[in-house]
């Protein structure tokens, strides 16, 4: 059996496989340690096998230099291709991370910082409020078809970023900076209602401590803070959901616009 006609496809196939594999590092759901490594490898291979026949003409037409034929030359290119998938996965996970950060701030202010649990989706410890909001944001991401969008976006990157030509351009840096700023803003907006109510509660208890020193403010303040903070959190869940939905859509739209195939 003559395998020589397949040799020119080894390089392009590894390029596509590298970009697809990068998604499985930080991308929501795909990067979770709950998915066995064997399943991730099989998914990456299956997606690559399905997408390669469609992508090969674009790769062959848009590359500015011939693809390397030796593994020594192919190694650095594969590393850059992995970074493309990693960048897309990380940016797509920003709404979940910012929501978890807002929940962490709320949990710390409510005195729930010691009630930490392991979050297998991010392979890190999180407090109960942060984990609850994280899974709410994750359900929003899946509900709007986020996984399908990032896969489509990854395939479109071959039109915007030819193999081996990843560059930290001003547009790319501006995209990352803008998305990080929006994510931090969402975290502050999520925590703001609870923080404002806790500030008023602390002010009221401080005033009460001055006017009625007989009250045990320390023993009275903690349960009141938790009750008021929980009420404020429940009342603001609808607004939090709208904020997460808006940021998730904005992140996906900004990334899709940036990685859109250039004509």
Image (cartoon, rainbow, N blue to C red):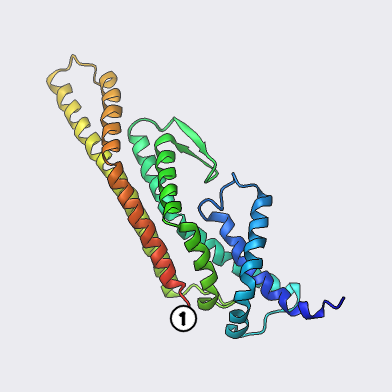
Q: How many marks?
A: 1
Quick check: can you spot residue 79? no
Q: Residue furthest top?
A: 214
Q: Observer-nearest residue: 147 or 162?
A: 147
Q: Is residue 261 left or right of residue 212?
A: right
Residue 246 found in image quarter: bottom left
Estimate the x, y position of residue 39 in percent, counting from the top left. 66, 51
Estimate the x, y position of residue 88 in percent, counting from the top left. 50, 63
Quick check: can you spot residue 238? yes
Q: Observer-nearest residue: 98 or 61?
A: 61
Residue 3 found in image quarter: bottom right
Name the element at disc 1. loop
What residue is shown at x 35% (from left), y 53% (from top)? 245
Estimate the x, y position of residue 161 in percent, counting from the top left. 53, 76
Q: Is residue 52 left or right of residue 228?
A: right
Q: Observer-nearest residue: 121 or 123?
A: 121
Q: Is residue 193 above or below residue 10?
A: above
Q: Is residue 139 above or below residue 181?
A: above
Q: Residue furthest left?
A: 211
Q: Which residue is mark 1?
A: 262
Q: Assign the N terminus to one quadrant of the image.
A: bottom right
Q: Is residue 173 left or right of residue 72?
A: left
What residue is shown at x 52% (from left), y 42% (from top)? 124
Q: Is residue 217 left or right of residue 74?
A: left
What residue is shown at x 18% (from left), y 22% (from top)? 209
Estimate the x, y position of residue 121 in percent, counting from the top left. 53, 45
Q: Residues within 10 Å of mark 1 (few under 14, many from 20)?
A: few
């Amino acid at each position: 059996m003559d395998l020589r006609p397949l040799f020119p496809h080894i390089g392009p196939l590894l390029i596509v496989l590298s970009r697809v594999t990068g998604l499985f590092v930080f991308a929501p759901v795909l990067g979770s340690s709950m998915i066995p490594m064997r399943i991730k490898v099989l998914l990456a291979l299956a997606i690559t096998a399905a997408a390669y026949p469609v992508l090969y003409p674009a790769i062959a037409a848009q590359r500015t230099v011939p693809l390397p034929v030796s593994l020594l030359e192919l190694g650095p290119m594969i590393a850059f291709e992995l970074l493309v998938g990693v960048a897309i996965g990380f940016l797509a996970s920003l709404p979940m991370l910012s929501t978890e950060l807002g929940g962490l701030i709320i949990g710390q202010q409510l005195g729930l910082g010691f009630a930490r649990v392991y979050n297998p989706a991010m392979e890190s410890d999180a407090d109960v409020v942060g984990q609850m909001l994280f899974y709410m944001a994750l359900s929003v991401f899946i509900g709007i078809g986020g996984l399908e969008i990032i896969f489509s976006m990854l395939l479109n990157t071959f039109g915007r970023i030819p193999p081996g030509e990843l560059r930290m351009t001003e547009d790319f840096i501006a995209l990352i900076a803008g998305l990080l700023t929006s994510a931090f803003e969402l975290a502050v907006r999520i925590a703001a209602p609870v923080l404002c109510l806790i500030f008023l509660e602390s002010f009221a208890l401080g005033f009460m401590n001055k006017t009625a020193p007989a009250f045990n403010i320390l023993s009275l303040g903690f349960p009141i803070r938790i009750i008021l903070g929980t009420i404020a959190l429940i009342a603001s869940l609808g607004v939090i959901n709208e904020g997460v939905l808006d940021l998730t859509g904005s992140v996906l739209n900004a990334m899709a616009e940036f990685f859109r195939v250039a004509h």
